[in-house]
Amino acid sequence: MSGRKGAIGKDGSTGPSVSGDKSKDFRPTRDDILRYIANNPDKSGKREIAKAFSLKGEDRIWLKDILRDLQDEGALEKDRKRLVRPGALPHVAVLDIFARDADGGLLGRPTDQPEDALPTVVSIKMSRGSGPTAGIGDRVLAKTFPTHAETGPAYTARVMKIFEKRKDAVLGVFRVLQDGSFRIEPVERRQPELTVEKEYQNGAQNGDLVEVEPQRATRYGLPRAKVLNVVGSLTSEKAVSMIAIHAHDIPHIFPSEVLAEAEAVKPATLSGREDWREVPLITIDPADAKDHDDAVFAEPDTDESNPGGVIAIVAIADVAAYIRSGTALDREALKRGNSVYFPDRVVPMLPERISNDLCSLKEKVDRPALAVRMVFSAEGRKIRHSFHRIMMRSAARLAYSQAQAAIDGVPDDTTGPILEPILKPLWAAYGVLKRGRDSRQPLELDLPERKILLKPDGTVDRVIVPDRLDAHKLIEEFMIQANVAAAETLEAKKQSLVYRTHDAPSLVKQESLREFLATLGLSLARGAQMKPAQFNQILNQVRGAENEALVNEVVLRSQSQALYSPENLGHFGLNLRRYAHFTSPIRRYADLIVHRALIGSLGLGADGISRGEEERLEDISALISATERRAMAAERDTVDRLIAGYLSGQINETFDARISGVTKAGLFVQLPQFGADGFIPVSSLDGDYYIYDEAARALFGDRTGKGYQLADRVEVRLIEVAPLAGAMRFEMLTDPKPLPGSKRSFHKAKAQRPRGRASQPSRGPARNRRR
């Protein structure tokens, strides 16, 4: 293919050096396109690329084909509506500042970069005059800019926001040594061991988890520290979750200014609201829920033009009435981004005065709410909807199991009187909405969620898989439809908002999944417009089969990560064109932004979204996406530590396990009984030299071709436990087995093995690594 070189302008953009003739002889080369995308990360959509090279008509069709080829080859990836080079940082990223360069400048790296990826180093440009000042150890939200330099950092960045300055206090375990002296054992590797004088013990006992304040180091001996607070025994859940809170820099103490604002808030009145207190809305939540931010009601539609139709109402706590933009409460809520849920602790986004009192839709108590009234046809198609700012009074507070029992014929004193007038119409409406869901065909993965039950002392009692009831599905579908209505209304009003987006799997991930399915004799259709229904067909084929769990797991891993964004990419998993989080403003800042946008665009009050918030939606979206990932990591770490501590007394015991991850370094295994992961180093797998086959998600023996594959059920022995790190190392007891596609995969992997490689792996000690 012939082409011309593009010119690089003063702003770093690559554009056409010749204008006028639009023939194929003057189309940009592939290198021109890749260079332009690298230089212009903010202008790398198909339209922007076509405009930069003055491509029109047939040339735009040619460009579309070229861009698709580059994606198929792995030279480009799709990121929202933009195209990026693989491994490229987003324009707004969360960075950890870890060092200084030779000139004293700060260096950072992406917070969520995979462990096995080459580290991306970012040079932090300091703001002059106003603006946040960062230092080593800070986690920051920053705008990134590629440098394209052959040496030095690949990116520069400008700090937009510092997440949380590290406190002077650090966490450690209080130890009493044999000579009676006191030490602080660090819970993170980067922390030094500290010594404590008796007068600074502050009541700490051996084995307590404590917060300490390091003192100025002396010329001799270990650094000294003073115990500030005894968190509790290391064996308690409270202590274990506190480790995760500190490790992930999760704000967990409300500043006095925020608490004072919360206490000063006055209850909302009926002024400016519709009176819906006679509408029998009810809340249905987990039995142990302390706040209730959504209520539901449904009835048949009496409109003769909509036979078999229903009216569904979802009312959501009016948090915007209490959390005004720019206040201390608002700033703290944004910093937290969301509530964080541990097995026996919640780090809330809002103070208890707001979340558990004024905004909680308590039974028989007047509460302000933002409600959406939706009308559905008999087929489950939404005909119309409207939003209302109301005063409501919950008719009943029910648990999921309680509501389900009533529908199943076992009502109690609370559900008996409301079974016919409230619960049965709700379930009838859910039947209608389910028809619409079935027609929409969202992605239907079967991956049960586990829940840890604790003893009174905070240690693990057992792990269960709660039943998935129709009551859960009812509330889920009502909330999904309310979220869709919110996004549709704001789009119709041309109001900026934060979408909940879930992009389709990248072409690279699709091809990887396709190769894996081929090893099982399954095929996945090709096409640029992949739909959830195509994945569901695969899942239906393996339902009830031996490899059902394996396929569900691999399909899940092929999906993109859900994000918040001011750009609408749709929600692939739910198969929805537009979607916004509206239903949980007590625990998610994204929902609060959507509430303010609805209030402002519909003229429902003076506390709508501000102009400043509208201008910062990109930054806000990046921040709350990061806090969501932070919360998920902290919750997972706490579960790992709890289970590791629980199993620390069962060294050399055997367990039934399932392979949950396969890497070149070894196998991750999950104990289904506990939902916890451990590691088996490849160096400990005896009898063969094992080769990693990425397509098959397996390790194959070089000599036998037998091996281990993702989702295999195996027997393992617990060898080593590190409770503070939440890490466990196992030994494989199950013999390797022939696997589907093993002959093809084995020879392919063997052919790719580098020549001259040692025939036996190192037998040195292997450390457990977290996925």
Image (spheres, rainbow, N blue to C red):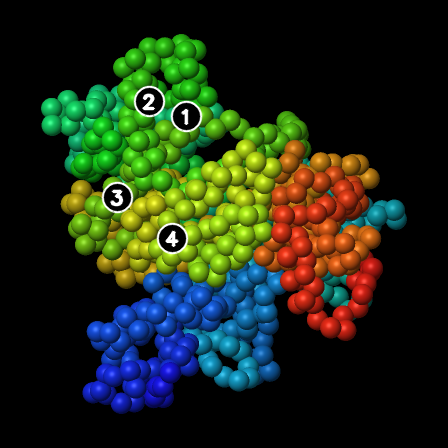
Rendered location of residue 40, percent (x, y): 36, 76
Rendered location of residue 396, percent (x, y): 34, 20
Disc nearer the start of the sequence (3/4): 3
Query: Which class describes the residues within 10 Å of circle 4: few (<14), some (14-19), or many (20+)?
Result: some
Query: Which residue corresponds to the image point at 73% horizontal and 73% vertical from the top-left?
Result: 755
Instruction: Tell me the SS state at disc 3.
Output: helix
> For the residues marked 1 and 4, what is the alpha-carbon distance in whole angstroms?
29 Å
Q: Which mark is residue 637?
A: none
> For the residues marked 2 and 4, what is the alpha-carbon distance in whole angstroms?
33 Å
Disc 2 versus disc 3: nearer the observer:
2
Rendered location of residue 568, percent (x, y): 30, 55
> For the residues marked 2 and 1, what is the alpha-carbon distance in whole angstroms?
9 Å
Most extreme residue toward the left, as rendered?
304
Mark 3, residue position? 486
Contact between marks 2 and 1 (CB within 8 A): the answer is: yes
Disc nearer the start of the sequence (1/4): 1
Q: Which mark is residue 427?
A: 2
Mark 1, residue position? 470
Instruction: Tell me the SS state at disc 4.
Output: loop
Query: Which residue corresponds to the image point at 49% horizontal and 39% vertical from the top-left?
Result: 541
Mark 2 residue type: Trp
Mark 3 residue type: Ala
> For the residues marked 3 and 4, what is the alpha-carbon distance in whole angstroms?
26 Å
Disc 3 versus disc 4: nearer the observer:
4
Mark 4, residue position? 530
Instruction: Tell me the SS state at disc 2.
Output: helix
Query: Which class describes the residues within 10 Å of circle 3: few (<14), some (14-19), or many (20+)?
Result: many
> For the residues marked 1 and 3, what is the alpha-carbon distance in whole angstroms?
24 Å
